[in-house]
Each structure stands twice: as structure tokens, then as C-alpha cells.
Image: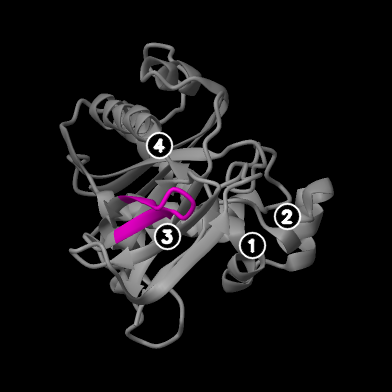
Amino acid sequence: MKKTIAIILFFLISLMPVAAFCSEQPGASMYLWRLINAARVYPLRAIESLGIDEETARQVLGEDAWILDQGLPPLAWNDSLFQAASGHNQDMVAQLYYSSTGLDGSSIADRIAAQGYDAVGSDELLGVMAFDAVIESLEAARMLFENWLQDELNPANTSARRIFSRVFTEVGFSFKSAVLDLGEDIPHNVYVAVTDFACPRVPVAYLIGNVYQDDNGNGCWEPAEGLSGVGLALRDVILDDSDFFTSGPLGAYQVAVSGIVFTVAVVDVQGMPIGADSFSDTAFGWWENRLADFRLQ
């Protein structure tokens, strides 16, 4: 139903010479990134939370039904994919159209290549939601994600899978809030999302997750608990060398895995580990991204 509303909305505005204003919502993009990765890593939890029938989901996935039991690796954030998605999002709002094909005829493959991304495969997922009154961007992102996942596991859907695709390893999200002058009878507060999926020709394995303060004690990350600006360190155990980085919006972080044996931990300003979860593993044989959250104690 939401998809139908979106199509009708953009059909209407394509006929009207109206002004449009929009701005990027990085927190909502980070939230979509997390929601999609959580669904890939823990698919049974995701479909249960949305009331999607497991047997129906297995039938839709067909020979890939094993995904529900084993999950898929999370998708790494890529800035080039984000720039391609953001540019296309801006163009759709400014030019008042809704399509993965640009008005200049460009495709997702064209746009990411223009950003210097060398892909062996790519696809794009669009979303739009319109409201009479403004709603919080994270709530809109959650609603959009739920709509995407339900559509993907709908037996009537004939589109290629993106969330549960085995092909893609990286992603870029653009989530913009827009105010469109559509007249009195049409909602004018709009969120527009463009998600660009791809697999690079030269793969890189990442550790991905969120840093959070477990305020409610349930042992799980939630948006309000994410901590930005927290220091982390990736330590090569054999070389005894560390790379330092910080968490971003909603506590999100991502680090390329390096070293044969490594650890990742939350650290203080002196680079010393503090009371929090840590992650240790060997990078030998790593070909896939992994998800690991850090809970501050």
C-alpha cells in the first residue's frame, strides 16, 4: 500500500511545477544500515518481529531458504555508494521524479562508476513516505525498512532481492527529508530514501557494529543507546600495532580487518581498553564482513 501511495504521489508532483527543499538525515541512514544488517545477520528475529510467516518466507527464498537459518554477512558502508545515492536522491527531489533511471538516462551502475566505484554487481532500492505532520526521521526509517522487508518476502513480489542478496557486500544510504509545495490536499512532508548496493571488484573484509550504553539492561543495541565519539582500537597482536578510530552517529563503527591475529576494543583517550565488550579473532581466511557490538559496562 505504501509503495502505491509513493508512486501516486510522485506521479502527481511530476505534473506540477512546484518547489522542493531537502536535507540529508545521517542518523536515519545509519539506522537503516543497522536495520538491514541486523535482518541479514539475524533473519529469523527480523521476520518474527514483523509477523512474517516463516514458512512463507522459506517459500519465497526457495533454494536460498538456508539464509533464514544461517544468516548473511552484514553490508559495509561505502562513501562512494553514499555519494551516488545522495546525488540521485537530490536529483529526484529537485526534478520531481521517482525512478532508478535518472532523467539523463543514467543507471545505478553509471552513477557509482562516476564516483570511482569499480563494481562487479550493483542494484538500487528506493523508498518514499509522505505525512501530513512531521514525524521523527528514525521512526520514518524504521517504517520504510519494514515496508522493504515485507515487500521482499511477499510471494507476489517478482523483483530481485536486495536485503537478502548473497551478491552484495557494500552499501550506501541516502535518507533525505523534503518539503514539497503540493497544494492543500496532498501531504507535503516527505522522506525519500535511496539505497545503493554493490560488490567491489577487489573485496575488503570489515568488522561492523555499534557502541552503546545498555541503559535498559536487555543486552541489545537500541537507537537511543548508541554512543558517538567513542574511541576504539584495532590491534594487530603479532606486530603489537594499533589503529584508532571513533564511533559515529548512533554509535556506528566500521573498520577494515588487518593482521593475522587482531583484537578490537573500546579505549580511553590514552588508548587503554576500558570496561566494555571486546572482539578477538584471526583474520586468516576472512572473506566476509562480520557484525560485533560493543556494550559499555
Which residue extends farthest top? 104
Estimate the x, y position of residue 194 in percent, counting from the top left.
40, 38
Classify residue 11 as left or right of residue 183.
right
- Helix, strand or loop at label 1? It is helix
Q: Which residues are magenta?
A: 232-243
Q: Is residue 118 above or below residue 192?
A: above
Residue 235 belongs to the span the image colors magenta:
yes
From mark 4 to mark 1, how far is it between C-alphas? 23 Å
2 vs 4, front mark: 4
| Mark nearer the N terminus (4 vs 1) | 1
Q: Which disc, if any, is residue 78?
A: 4
Q: Is residue 287 above or below residue 130?
A: above
Classify mark 3: residues with Cα within 10 Å, few (<14), some (14-19) or many (20+): many
- Residue at coordinates 25% horizontally, 63% vertically from top-left? 230
Which residue is under mark 2? Answer: 67
Q: Which disc, if any, is residue 43?
A: 1
| Mark nearer the N terminus (3 vs 1) | 1
Amino acid at circle 3: Val
Amino acid at circle 1: Pro
